[in-house]
Amino acid sequence: MSETLVRLEGVSKRFGSAPLAVAEVTTTIVGGGITALAGPDGAGKTTLLRLMLGLLKSDAGKLTVCDLDPISHAHRLREVVAYMPQRFGLYEDLTVFENLRLYADLRGVAEQQRAETFERLLTLTGLAAFQSRLAGALSGGMKQKLGLACALVRAPRLLLLDEPSVGVDPISRRDLWRLIRVLAGEGIGIVWSTAYLDEAERCERVLLMNDGKLMYEGVPSELTKRMAGRTFHVRNAGEQRRAVLAVAAKRTGVIDAVIQGSNVRIVMAEGAATPSPEEFSKDSGVDIVAVSPRFEDAFINLLGSKSPAVSRLARASDNFRTTEPVIVAKDLTRRYGSFTAADRISFSIGKGEIFGLLGPNGAGKSTTFKMLCGLLRPTSGEARVAGLDVVAQTSAARNRLGYMAQKFSLYGDLSARQNLDFFAGVYGLTGAQRHDAVKRVTEAFGLGRYLDTNAGTIPAGYKQRLALACAIMHEPPVLFLDEPTSGVDPLTRREFWAHINALVAGGVTVMVTTHFLDEAEYCDRIALVYRGRVIATGSPDDLKSSVRTQALPDPTLEDAFIALVEADDRTVAA
Amino acid sequence: MFVRIWPLFVKELLANWRDKANRYVLLFAPIIQLLIFSFAATQEVKNVPLAVLDEDRTVLTRELISRFEGSPQFSQVIRLNGVTEIASVIDARIAPAVLHIGSDFSRRLSAGQPAQIQLLLDGRRSNAAQIIHGYASEIVDRLNGELVQLGRLKGPPSVVVARTWFNPNSDTLWSTVPGLFAVLITVVGMMVSGLSVARERELGSFQQLLVSPLTSTEILIGKALSALAIAMTQGIIVMLIAMYGLGIPMEGSMMLLVAAMIVFLMSVIGIGLFISSLSDTQQQAIIGVFMFLAPAILLSGYATPVANMPDWLQTVTLANPIRHFVVISKGVFLKDLPIDVIASHLWPLALIAGVTLSAAAWLFRHKIA
């Protein structure tokens, strides 16, 4: 069962003059289980996978895959290794079945085996009913499954998956995960690369990477165990949770602090004394409870975090005073022909609130988000931001909102300073005003050393900072975030949210859409969008407790998400 | 409004300049094309063989033939022995032209009667044929002139010569470059504007731009002006190289040409932005740009005269901005075209610019919101 499939001995790879993308990695990967290749974007995961596939040649070290040299035995390697890249090369104008047949042709699958293989794969992926549908018309999750089926047309000994769960909603992710489990049960060795540490935690083994280096290899729980006794919840912080977080960030001995619903989760340094509730709040309701450690805590510890991130963003002058709701959606509807992407969506968001928009792919969450920030014109209904009608007063409304997208969407060929100057300029800042704004964000985000570097080539963490800097330079009272921290390492994510918390403390209202449920935990309130409608609203804790059962006494936000969507499916079916 | 357009304008210029590959393409490609097309791809005909059937065989005809032999345009002179050989020479493409001197040529000439030389041309190579005709006429004409000077010619000259106007030296560079100039600035203007929106869409920065207070009209103006600035700079460089490097005269007003360039480029940029707003990727934009460029250049009168096209097609070319600008460019470079003639081509350009820019603005507003 556990034959050694991959052997790496001191493998290194460098691109140009950049630091090593993969630095002297020595490890083995065994069959019959899922090995997570975990780490943030840019950690070297994809490079390592490509080295194993013989798509890249290593600069140093020895590497064998299924006892073959990936470069000199490339041809034989292709017969035993299957690979699913981040964006699988599906032919969108071919049907599901035609795609399968094409890949069978390309990989030389014998004619007599095809009928049986196709049937098995179609059943496995649940695509049997969609054989004649064009691949381009499938949902994101189904495309991912079809990609997987195409990669499996020739039964491999080793399956390499490059971030299969990126951009996939929790429900599709769970399906995919089940599918991979079945394959692992059949004895195929599986490498699952991921930036989500909760996924890594569920694998039999993990290779944890950062900056090209292998930080840890082994059973995830072994690493997590090292954190035992060091993780706590500051319970019932409720309204004060951001204040508690700020206190925790300054206390010595705390190496990590994040908001989870109405609690603040803290991780202590090794040997540090357990803090008392009084240190965080005078409120007698606040309590400290030991909780079980997570894999992410261990990673943070490995990364050598000394204390939680603190934002240097000065409290912005709060020049937008209102008691009215800041973001209002009133019967927002968007139709595409006969298809209703968003159906009478209504909610209102108060000042200084972080509001999350969650939902499966294609449920209408992005449509709603786009209508609120003026990227999409609603068919009917009203969208108001900071007191202005987004449709009627588009330009004025946009002046009051900041926007940051998941994908790095600045100008890569322009230097950081030129990007800042440009965005300051289009938001109407001129002369001294612009100079001050650029100076202010440069200091707050520590961008000084990269000001004259092309934005496309600065490190990922700094790109993130630059993007946020560009979005808030004009001090907008409203901030729209579209999956802001997907794929970034946990430290950068914490730093990002520290900045967001500082902005919120200054009166900024934040709307965020995400697939990443850790991000959703930072929200004050969440709206769950499904089939174009809001099916639930409430704080993360409300949503969790709404699905609490005896079988599931401590549901996670992901559990809540899935349960609520399934409950809605049942009501619609009934 | 200007406050917001200016940073966009600067950003567009920087983005085009700081992309290394883009910078070199924009800077050097038009100049290299200018030099290649004007030297390598001129319409000049050199080193072609010429077949001669001399039935007269006198001192005069021998003198005439030796001039053909000495001319750099003809590589060799093939002597034929009878009329029957003419067809085979043309058919087998041994020579594109046959010079046929009748047996009574000298006699008629000395008798003061009109004497003719027949030049048979291969119609399949119509362009070359036309040019050879020009060369041949010129050689015969020169001989006529010398005979008159020597007093040996009393009657009318031997061959009617179609003189080439405004290009007395038969310098084909002169007729090529002004047209080429029009084509090159079209390509630069189209590429810069055609890629601008599509590039941002592909990179993901377009959304960021769309949520900014910039209105779609402002984005369009910013992008149009930056493309105009780039194409104008490039156009002026090409113009100066043409004048001082290639020695093309500037008979008309340079300022007038520059002003016409602005109107012309706006019409082209309107088309470029229209294509760009339709495209989701740069690849689609490039295909779109070439779908327009290829027929537009063919129907511009740059390579083949508009007058040679069927009537209905000539009407179609009126909507082609390049066609109007080729006339203006050739006119201003070579013959100080009268202002009213320029105006008659300028207002259609302004009209086309108005239509294409409004169409781009309309599409821009409707495709994004």
Image (tube, rainbow, N blue to C red):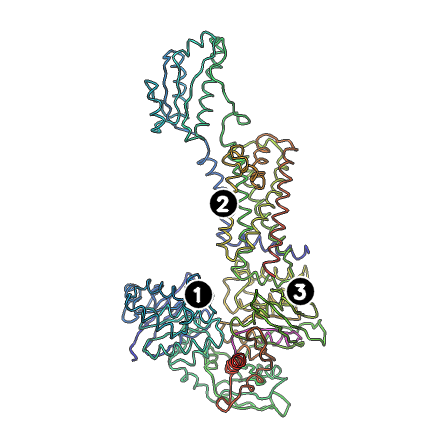
Mark 3 vs 1, N-terminal side: 1
- Which amino acid is tagged 2? Phe
Disc 2 to disc 3, C-alpha distance? 45 Å
The numbered dot on residue A292 is: none
Instruction: Determine whether, in the image, residue B71 is placed left or right of residue A64.
Output: right
Q: Are marks 2 and 3 on the same chain?
A: no
Q: How many marks?
A: 3
- Which amino acid is tagged 1? Ala
As helix, strand or loop, the secondary structure at mark 2 comes to helix
**Residue lying furthest front:** A574
Q: Position of residue B260 (x, y in %)?
A: 62, 40
- Which amino acid is tagged 3? Val
Q: Position of residue A342 (x, y in %)?
A: 59, 71
Q: Nearer the viewer, residue B253 or A535?
A: A535
Residue under label 1: A135
Residue under label 2: B28
Residue under label 3: A391
